[in-house]
Image (cartoon, rainbow, N blue to C red):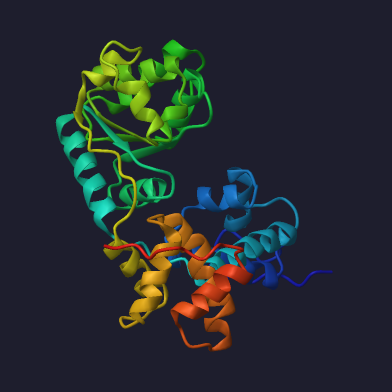
């Protein structure tokens, strides 16, 4: 028979419940992790493939049977996430791309019109959306799935607003307008080029009737959809207040800052910085997800001196990358 559970920091768990002392401890570990890293329960539920309701019951001590399996599953996810934080992925660096996109978002929120942000793959658009939302709570980030329909789009908006989702497109539209009208919300639509034409039209009507700002974020393909003055999205084009030139790469200074933050060093060999810049070709994703983790795992982990030649060797033998012919300039 299981030993009675102590209540500890989980007041919802009764002394004679099916929660063992080990279960209580594990639940507290999960809650402490979420608090430390400022992550919501909904994020963890998605990562662990658990229904939000189940996760809430498990962590509040109200699960109807033994929660050991679910708690082990949650801790396994958090262990992986903790390791991922150590694998060379840097803390967010507020560089030139962020500063430009921040101006677009703030201005669009104030003017309550449309803004458009376009950039090549890998410059950090999606990460910007996440970080901007963290710093600006009245921001709704919608990640578009291929050919997102109006119904799915409005469902996601209502869920982000923690609102019940009514049936029917008309009812959903009216509910969104009711909630947003008179507020200072900004809607950030990531990968907007994938949104269906009908969903885009509903988005325009939401902006018009609720009077909130909307920023469309996407690759250069978004330009081809919105830019034509007599194209299918002419009404959106006419409402755009800010639309910077398509961003092709991060800057060399941005890349250097990312490297220094990741490797926790203010002084690094110039030839190493030059080599990393040449390999990443201006892509923040290549730098943070491939080059720097490989340098950590196959160089720093073995206490090898950091150098350009070490990076060349790792790029060749681990990442199967060809040596750059020329090193780029700032």
Q: Is residue 114 left or right of residue 7?
A: left
Residue 192 sits in quarter: top left
User: Depth check: 1 or 31 in front?
Assistant: 31
Measured as percent of width and height from the top left, residue 303 is found at: 53, 89
The residue sitting at 32% across, 22% down in the picture is 226
User: Depth check: 257 or 204 in front?
Assistant: 257
Measured as percent of width and height from the top left, residue 14 is found at: 64, 62
- How many numbered dots are placed on residues in this image? 0
Measured as percent of width and height from the top left, residue 121 is found at: 43, 44
Quadrant location of the N terminus? bottom right
Q: Can see residue 251?
A: yes
Residue sitting farthest toward the front: 325
* Residue 156 in the image: above or below residue 257: above
Residue 180 sits in quarter: top left
Residue 302 sits in quarter: bottom right
The residue sitting at 34% across, 62% down in the picture is 328
Quadrant location of the C terminus? bottom left
* Residue 177 in the image: above or below residue 8: above
């Amino acid at each position: 028979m299981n030993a009675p559970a102590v209540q500890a920091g989980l007041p919802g768990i009764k002394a004679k419940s099916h929660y063992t002392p080990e279960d209580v401890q594990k639940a507290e570990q999960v809650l402490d992790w979420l608090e430390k890293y400022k992550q919501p329960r909904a994020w963890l539920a998605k990562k662990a493939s658990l229904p939000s309701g189940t996760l809430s019951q498990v962590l509040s001590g109200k699960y109807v049977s033994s929660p050991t399996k679910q708690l082990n599953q949650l801790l396994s996810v958090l262990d992986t996430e903790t390791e991922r934080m150590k694998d060379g992925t840097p803390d967010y660096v507020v560089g030139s791309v962020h500063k430009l996109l921040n101006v677009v978002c703030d201005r669009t929120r104030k003017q309550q019109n449309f803004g458009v942000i376009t950039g090549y793959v890998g410059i950090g658009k999606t990460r910007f959306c996440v970080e901007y939302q963290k710093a600006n709570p009245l921001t709704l980030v919608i990640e578009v799935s291929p050919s997102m329909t109006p119904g799915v789009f409005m469902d996601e908006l209502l869920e982000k607003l923690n609102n019940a989702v009514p049936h029917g497109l008309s009812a959903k539209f009216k509910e969104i307008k009711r909630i947003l009208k008179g507020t200072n919300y900004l809607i950030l639509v990531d990968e907007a080029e994938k949104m269906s034409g009908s969903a885009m039209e509903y988005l325009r009507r939401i902006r018009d009737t609720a009077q909130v700002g909307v920023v469309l974020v996407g690759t250069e393909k978004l330009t081809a959809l919105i830019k034509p003055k007599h194209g299918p999205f002419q009404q959106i084009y006419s409402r755009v207040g800010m639309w910077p030139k398509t961003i092709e790469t991060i800057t060399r200074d941005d890349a250097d800052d990312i490297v220094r933050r990741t490797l926790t060093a203010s002084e690094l060999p110039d030839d190493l910085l030059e080599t990393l810049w040449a390999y990443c070709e201006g892509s923040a994703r290549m730098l943070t997800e491939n080059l720097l983790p490989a340098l950590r795992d196959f160089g720093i982990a073995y206490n090898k001196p950091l150098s350009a030649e070490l990076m060349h060797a790792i790029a060749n033998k681990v990442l199967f990358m060809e040596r750059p012919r020329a090193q780029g300039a700032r």
